[in-house]
Amino acid sequence: MTAVGIVANPASGRDIRRLVAGASVFPTAEKANMVQRMLGALATVNVTTAYVSVDLGGISAKVLRAVRHRPAHAAPWPEVRFVDDDTITGRAEDTTNAVHRMVAAGADVIICLGGDGTARVATAALLDGPGHDIPLLPLSTGTNNAFPELREATVAGLAAGLVATGAVDPALATSRASVLAVTCGDRTEPALVDVGVATARHVGARALWDPTALTELYCTFAEPDAVGLSSVPGLLCPSPRDKPDGVALRLCPVEEAPTVVHAPIAPGLVLPVGVAEWRPLRVGERVEVATRTGVVAVDGEREIELHGTVPATVRLRGDGPRRVDVTAVMDQAARTGLFRQIAGRSGKDSQR
């Protein structure tokens, strides 16, 4: 049996930034359609089982209806098994529970639909147990999507299936991402893209969109075409995601800053950010957060409150999730003729 897990977050793309920025809403119907397009693609490359998360937002309900009413003459899908063992809460723990269940059931690849926050939760669920080496394919359906890819679900399904079945070389098809580990007391939170430290007093609405209170910023990578906090170093001191090292910045008020970067902090929201200094952040390096009172945001969402008693540290690790490289997978499939058929013979058999 070859199995792929699909986790779709109904809340992704719907946070408070829709009120303060120009971000679009990613509808439930499209997320459900994406899951269905992936199911068709997975069957094409001989995936036998698909584990699909259950939610209260309507995604899994639409997929269930599609499974029950699928025409007999339609192209086959893998056997669809809904992961409904845990009580659905509408919170991040739903993703955590679903990933744990899929790993235990033998999923060979996990696909997650969401933004940076969803990918972070899925990664944490993989890294804290036996799923550390299971490849992750994150697809963009969120607000800030620096880590997930904006891909057609059909192609993503093909790539995930080829990795799951072992049809492509995993050494070429996946790569190990870096991850930031934020520790405060006995709590540790991972971040796939960025860790921002702000002087705000409470976590509040979680989503971070105002850079004026930011004092420190740490990124695993920084690309010029990104949106979110990582766009600041991306436009100032780019650090590609295929390199292990990241970047660290000390921020300050714009009126006091020697350098000001106008960066897309959120979709439709380009704001000036004052930068006092920046430097490379090396793999294995641990930095103590200088700000004692405030909040720490991981991948754009405030998670940890700092009360001045217990210091927080940030460490860049090279043992993050194994990420599926869709382009590399499909390139390898094309080069080896996996989708080619001539005179009734497979592409591999017809190569000369």
Image: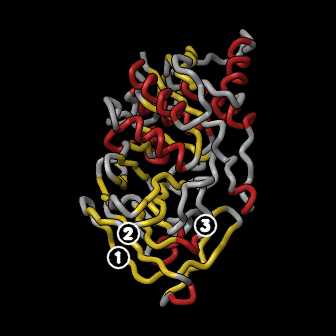
Q: Secondary structure at mark 3?
A: strand
**Left or right of 74: which side holds 148?**
left
Mark 1 is on which residue type?
Arg
What is the crowding at mark 3: few (fewer than 14 residues within 10 Å), some, or many (at least 20)? many
Mark 2 and 1 residues: CB-CB less than 8 Å, in contact? yes
Q: Position of residue 21 (x, y in %)?
A: 72, 62
Q: What kind of residue is marked 3?
A: Ile
Task: Pick the residue in front: 106 or 123.
Answer: 123
Query: Residue drawn at (51%, 25%), measured in percent from left and top?
Result: 45
Name the residue rendered at 55%, 32% in the picture: 7
| Spot occupied by residue 223 in the image (x, y as percentages of width and height) | 49, 66
Question: Which residue was labeled with disc 2?
Answer: 247
Which callout, 3 or 1, points at the residue further toward the start of the chain?
A: 3
- Residue 265 bears which disc, if any? 3
On the question of residue 323 being in view, the answer is yes
Residue shown at 47% from the left, 64% from the top: 294
Q: Position of residue 303 (x, y in %)?
A: 49, 52
- Residue 352 visible in image: no
Q: Nearer the viewer, residue 120 or 19?
A: 19
- Dividing the picture into quarters, in which one does residue 123 lie? top left
Name the element at disc 2: strand
Callout 2 crowding tier (Cα within 10 Å): few <14, some 14–19, many ≥20: many
Residue under label 1? 279
